[in-house]
Each structure stands twice: as structure tokens, then as C-alpha cells.
Image (spheres, grey):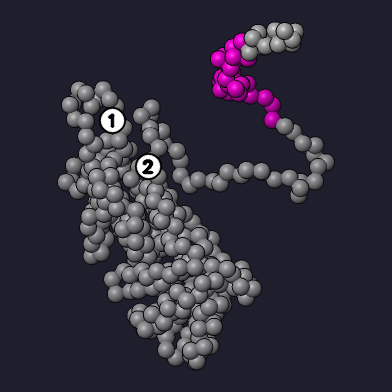
Amino acid sequence: MNSALKWMPLLAALALAGCAREGYYDNRSVDYAKAKESAPLELPDTRNTRRYRDAMPVPDVPGAFASQGDDFQAPPPRALNAGSGVAPGEVARREAGEQSWLVVGAAPGTVWSEIDDFATTRGLEVLSRDDRRGVMETEQGRISVSPGLHQGVSEVRCEQGGASVEGCLRALERRFEQRSNLASATASGLSVQGRMAQTRQPPRLEQAEDGWQLVLPYDLDRAWAELSAQLEADFSLEDRRQLLEQDISTHTFLVDYLPLSERSRGVWESLTSLEFSEQASRLRLTLSRQGADQTLVRASAADDEALAANDARELLERVGGLLR
């Protein structure tokens, strides 16, 4: 018998023993628990600071973190089509009362270039134009472009005497629908984009004396129209979150929502109460004007009962996420 083969059983046993203890890969999960913090790396002052920056920068988050205790659970993921306005290159209609406008999935500079070409091909008589503000005055009315509520999205309005011009909006809507390369900024669009850029502030959650409130840096009509569209898309899951009614006269939304307190109920609580099913709550979202370009959103129980602060906060967080 070959002498080398006599060692095979022993080698196999050692290999299997190693696999049984550590597996094929070394289990290093405990290394993180035992890890110790070391001093930060210091670069010499003589370095070229222009060549160094954060490899993975963390953006600032408005507002302060409020701990919800050991029962905290991450909120459920949003729908993929929610919280993003419109897809790049697409166009959608928004309405608030008698006002209508378009939301276009392209940067304002790109959209402004399209408006310029639209006026030329339609033979509109341009009385004045302001590239910086994105406003064009014509014999037929005013066409304006402004940054939308979401990043990389624009709003287009056609107005005459303060009223929306439906024919102009329909013509522009058809044009944007036919422009398959709308999301790709042209050279002229990029040149205008720098002049039309505006600081975009995200929604922020604040704790007031009487509870949590969501502050939207938009006027009431824009906030209502966009939130209506986003809730229709995202609050469409029965027994979890569902949009039931909306009333523009009172600027309220009625929703069924499974609150944090219900999702966080433990097994022991379910056993003691003999209530194993999760129960959605009927809640009301109310929008109110706070100055010219600011809107407040508050959450309350539809039956006028008290709504837990953590439940209100978590619902408003989700709503704010739809408008980021």
C-alpha cells in the first residue's frame, strides 16, 4: 500500500473537525464585539488638502433624533414608485382647486430649453423672457418653469390673468410625452440650469408643544397636490395603509394606517389580550398654511381620541419621505 495513502484518513478527520468547528470560512462575528476603538488617523499638515475628502460622506439630517425605546422597529419600505415625483423623462398633471400645472421629470434648465423651442415652433409672439426666473411672457399668456418638490423635477405653468390655460398645458404635455430624451440635459439646458438653480430644502419633522408636526417648505396648493398624488400611489395596501378620502376644501386626508404601537406589540401582549390580529387605525392628516411658502401637516385620530406621540411621529415621517 502506498505510504502516502495511509495518512489520508487522518487528514480527512482533521479537515472535517476543522469544518465542524469553524466552517469553511472563519466566523469573525465576535471580533466586532471585542473590537477596541483606536486613535483616528492623522494626516500631516503639509498634505495637499485638495486631494483629500470624505470617501463616504454622510448627509446632514434636519431635525433631532428622538429615541423610541427598546420597542423601536424600522418603518416598512415605501413603494418603489412613491416619494420620487415622476420618473425621469415623464410628465404628470397636478391640480389644486381650479389651478393646474405639469410636473416634468427633468431639470429646470432642460425643461426651459424645451419651452423656448416650443414657443419658436408654435410661432408664439414672445413679449419678454427671464432666463434666470424661468418666465416667458407671450401674447397668449405666461409660461413659467420652476424647480419641483423633488430633486431633478420641474413644474411648468401656463397662466393668463392668474388662471390656468388648459390648451397650453395640453400642448406642452403632449410635447413632453413625445420627447424620449427629455431626461438628458442638452448643452443649452445645462447653461441655463446654473442660473435657475435654487436651494432646495427638504421637509422636516418638528416637535411642537401639542405634538409632532411636519413642516413642508412649499405653499399650501403645491403641498396638497403633490401629497395627494403620492398618497394615492403609496397608501394603497389594504389593512396596512390606505387612502380613503381627501377633501381639498378642508385640506384633509383620511387614511387607514397600521401604527407603530400596533406593529410593535409583542407576543406576550397578544397572549394576555387574546388579540392576535393587527388593527389599522383611521387617522386624519390635516394641512394648514404657515406663511407664504410653508405648510404644516399634522396627524390625529379620526374619532377624536388621543393619538400616541410615537405613532403620529412615525406616520409623519413616512409622509415626509414621500415628498423628499
Magenta highlight range: 13-40
- What kind of element bears circle 1? loop
Disc 2 packing (10 Å; few <14; some 14–19; many ≥20): few
Residue 79 magenta-highlighted: no
Q: Which mark is residue 18?
A: none
37 is within the stretch colored magenta: yes
Q: Are circles 2 and 1 on residues that touch, CB within 8 Å?
A: no
The numbered mark, 2 or 1, whose residue comes first in the sequence reads 2
* Tag 1 residue: 265
Residue found farthest to the right = 46
Instruction: Please tell me in which quadrant of the rendered image residue 240 appears.
Output: top left
Pick the quarter of the image with the N terminus: top right
The residue sitting at 36% across, 29% down in the picture is: 71
User: What's under tag 2, amino acid-wise?
Assistant: Pro
Secondary structure of the residue carrying numbered label 2: loop
Residue at horizontal 28%, vertical 71%? 97
Judging by the rendered image, the residue that carries numbered circle 2 is: 76
Q: What residue do we see at 40% from left, 55% from top?
A: 82
